[in-house]
Amino acid sequence: MTEPAIWIRNLHKSFGTNPVLKGVSLDIPPGQVVCVLGGSGSGKTTMLRCIAQLETAEDGLIVMSGELLGLRERNGRLVPRSAHDIARQRRLAGMVFQRFNLFPHMTALENVMEGPVRVQKRAAAEVRSEALELLRSVGLEHRADHYPAQLSGGQQQRVAIARALALKPTVMLFDEPTSALDPESVGDVLAVMKSVAASGVTMLVVTHELSFAREVADRILFMDGGVILEDAPTADFFGTPREDRTRAFLAAVLGQKTTA
Amino acid sequence: MTRMTESSRLLALPRGRGIAWTQIASGVVLLALCVWIIHAFAVGQIEWRYVGQFLFVPSILRGVGATLLMAVCAMALGMVAGIVLALGRLSTAWLPRIVSGLYVWLFRGVPVILQLLIWFNLALIFPHVTLPGIGSYRTVDLMTPFLSALFGLGLNQAAYIAEIFRAGFQSVDRGQYEAASAIGMTRLMAMRRIIFPQAFRTVIPPLGNEFINMIKLTSLASLIQYPEVLHNAETIYYANTRVIELLIVAGFWYLAAVTALSPLQHLLERRFSRGKSS
Ligand SMILES: Nc1ncnc2c1ncn2[C@@H]1O[C@H](COP(=O)(O)OP(=O)(O)O)[C@@H](O)[C@H]1O
Ligand SMILES: [Mg+2]
């Protein structure tokens, strides 16, 4: 049995008195593409942010590529890792945000090179050719010297994907990567994500694009009220959803799509 | 029908320009006022040849140098301390937040001139200072006019710069910090590479204003015997009684310094506006 790319047990996270994750457990084998569906406020973003270590869970464990995230064992106890160690661990996963979050004072190329050059301290010349290759693979080599403000939303998001890939993460996390985009650019971004999926990177994608999920995902998670309510292979999930809540959600989303 | 033809007639009329009577009237009044003031200065008890004569004497030029030196040093101290204070103010820990808050409250609440005098007279409170590993000194020897002015002006400036940088840091989107973290940056590197350059472009205009204020504020140091341009001008007019002439000389140099600064500020603004949508 190969080691899972992501292993989560009993994850709990609240904001103040508001419990948002109420015991999430999950195994994702390497190379699997998993889409996360669920209503607004069900905790999808929070789960992703915990995996990316942008939030710290109060309880539960996450292991990625054999490393326990955020904690280490000392004298028979689990204690927090140093800030430096956590920064290193964050590179295990690449994160793509809903609002792109490109660095506005850097060109597309500089955005992609920033991590490898500054964080990994790799030689700029070598990184540069890799970064240009990445920009080519997202269809933006001709925009390498443009600043984010000079790019459309879809182009910015594709640069953001290239930026995350530049660190060669074993896992890619996407948080509604197309919900802030105009309809024309959604397709370009989804096409890039499809090619990332085909390259064998493990992917966890929060999305409302059901057709993308159907076509690309190996497996679908449905989150509701801070837990994973349903977890099934893609065909089964859409073909024979088990839970009433899932059926209601699918009906609502699909109904919206057909009336729109 | 007649209404229609009347409107069509209007359509054919050419456009003329209105006359802005209020602007003309106020322009005339202002011009008269300027002429009167210039005339008053020209015929008044001002010997203009003295102004020209003292504009470039060595003691005045040395004063100009000292003014600029103090402005630059005090501003540098204010920037370093101000940035530290701003980071403290935005810290998630309560101790740095409280300390920074108290500092800003104290230094903004007390007149600068008073702060200068306190630094200058520090010996009255602490007659001796011991610098660990260096030795013990008499405070009177240590608090020269230069150091007193530097601390007085710089540490007061820090309180204002802290507020400017706090607003600057807060203007940077939270997502920027998260994106920096996500690519594995430590907090320090994220600050240096991502947050700081973006905060800087919002703080440059107010910082420019602070520097201009600082150049003028250094004139207060004349009160504690720091030989800046106003102090040296005063020294000269105590001897020759050409008071107004020498004050005009000093005024000329402040004005020149402040004027020379504007292009520099524009240059900096351009340098840090990389990637800003325009
Ligand atoms: N930083 C935060 N502070 C307080 N509450 C938050 C924060 N982030 C998310 N929440 C709350 O957590 C709940 C789940 O949010 P989220 O994980 O973003 O859901 P989803 O992505 O599924 O829409 C929401 O009720 C939201 O208000
Ligand atoms: Mg969300």
Image (tube, coloured by chain):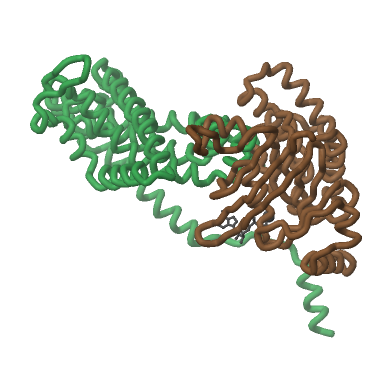
Chain colours: A brown, B green
Work out whether residue A1 can be spotted. Answer: yes
Rendered location of residue A174, percent (x, y)? 73, 45
Question: Which quadrant does the N terminus of chain B fall into?
Answer: bottom right
The residue lying at 27 percent from left, 26 percent from top is B51
The residue lying at 32 percent from left, 22 percent from top is B69
Q: Which of A80 and B222 is in front in this view?
A: A80
Question: Which quadrant does the C terminus of chain B fall into?
Answer: top right
Q: Nearer the viewer, residue B17 or A212?
A: A212
Where ligand 1 lies, by quadrant?
Answer: bottom right
* Image quadrant assignment for residue A94: top right
The residue lying at 83 percent from left, 49 percent from top is A219
Rendered location of residue B148, percent (x, y)? 21, 28
Q: Is residue B232 left or right of residue A82?
A: left
Instruction: Specify the farthest residue to the bottom.
Output: B1
For the image, the number of numbered tags is 0
Rendered location of residue B5, percent (x, y)? 82, 78
Rendered location of residue A208, percent (x, y)? 79, 56
The residue lying at 79 percent from left, 50 percent from top is A35
Work out whether residue B36 can be spotted. Answer: no
* Image quadrant assignment for residue A172: top right
